Image: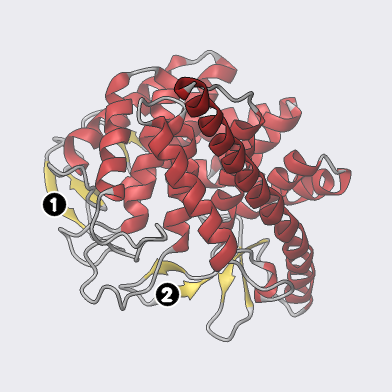
Amino acid sequence: MNKKYTIVCLLGAFLQLNAFAQKSVSKGFALAQKQTEVMLSSIDQAKNSGNVGVTPRSLTANGDLALVPSKDWCSGFFPGELWFLYQYTGQEKWLKLAKTFTAFIEDQKTNGGTHDMGFKIYTSVGNGYRLTKDPHYRDVIIEGAKTLSTRFNPKVGCIKSWDNRIWKFPVIIDNMMNLELLFEATKLSGDSSFYKIAVTHANTTIKNHFRANYSSYHVVSYDPETGEVLKKQTHQGYADESAWSRGQSWALYGYTMCYRETGDKTYLRQAENVAKFILDNPALPQDLVPYWDYNAPNIPNEQRDVSAAAVMASALYELSTYSTNGKLYRGKADLIVKNLTDRYTAGPGTSKGFILLHSTGSRPANTEVDLPLSYADYYYLEALLRQKHLDDKKPVVD
């Protein structure tokens, strides 16, 4: 009798959690559709006023829409959001819009002056290929991977991040997010060189980017001739030895993805250890929306970074499907998504159509502080879709 009662209670709790999660998904996407309609109007207004950008990134200090050209690292996120809306609704209008805005980004497939190929091409063209299998998109992905590969230095074992900066060969933790493009290109082309570059970069980053507590440096500078580590610093965090919050989320997401693509448990353990650093961090607020840096000096009177929370939630959903800590990760991701949906969304019709508020782009540079950001919206919608995917599976009661 007691065993049966326990099973019934567990099933009831699961069904209650499932209903709560489904409510977050439907509520989030309902707002996303309304806000995206506003965003489309805002884009038209900005272009009519002479703005030559192609996709939204944030708001200006005056509250105007900040559009960016295709070369900007954020250009692919809005097309990706449109693909997510098409995936969720199946509506033809979102498909047409996704194709239109994705076409604006395709010229970046040959831009070898940046490491952000994954952020630009994979979020837009990659999602387009995933949902349509259009062979044109396949070709763009492969071309983009070829271009990104030109930035790989075998002496260093990494893809170079920035050009024309103070460092000889800088590699930032964000670069882990661009490896998915390389993994996909190997699957689409059969060329294993992309895969090998991705794995080498991931391994070198594990070796040099992480501290003993599995927090990550933002920037590691290498000697391109010898591969020697020259400096370990920050560019967007509080200090060289601090833990910039979005950087930790990039690491969590990147190594979870690497485990998916390789099956190498080294990456699974790395993702689990990064998750532990984040989730056990005493500076993480109860609502799991981080301050912009886990070591920012004036916590709790510091700005939040909603984008770090959105990336974290999406990563935790995927990690929950691989790890023995899956229930913990799933519960934390659900809580983040609920809090983002209930507390950090824009009012309908406001903020030029952005979905989430209170992100922090670069606090040290005082740019895009406490503002909406396109990549926060992108990873929020991805998290909602991953939540829905998990909820659609039949429940298993142990």
Q: CA distance from mark 2 to mark 1?
A: 25 Å
* Residue 331 image position (x, y, % from top left): 45, 42
Residue 280 shows in this picture: yes
Identify the residue position indicated by label 2 in the image. 367
Identify the residue position indicated by label 1 in the image. 231
Crowd class of label 2 (few under 14; some 14 to 19; many from 20; radius 10 Å) = few
Task: Tell me: 141 left or right of 155.
Answer: right
Circles 2 and 1, Cβ within 8 Å, touching? The answer is no
Which residue lies at the image location 69% right of the left edge and 76% below the top edge?
Answer: 350
Q: In the current view of this chain or complex, which residue is farthest to the front?
A: 1
Q: Is residue 324 above or below residue 334?
A: above
Q: Is residue 267 above or below residue 248?
A: above
Mark 1 belongs to which amino acid?
Lys
Q: Secondary structure at mark 2?
A: strand
Which residue lies at the image location 43% right of the left edge and 66% below the top edge?
Answer: 361
* Residue 46 image position (x, y, % from top left): 72, 75
Q: Nearer the viewer, mark 2 or mark 1?
A: 2
Task: Tell me: 121 left or right of 293.
Answer: right
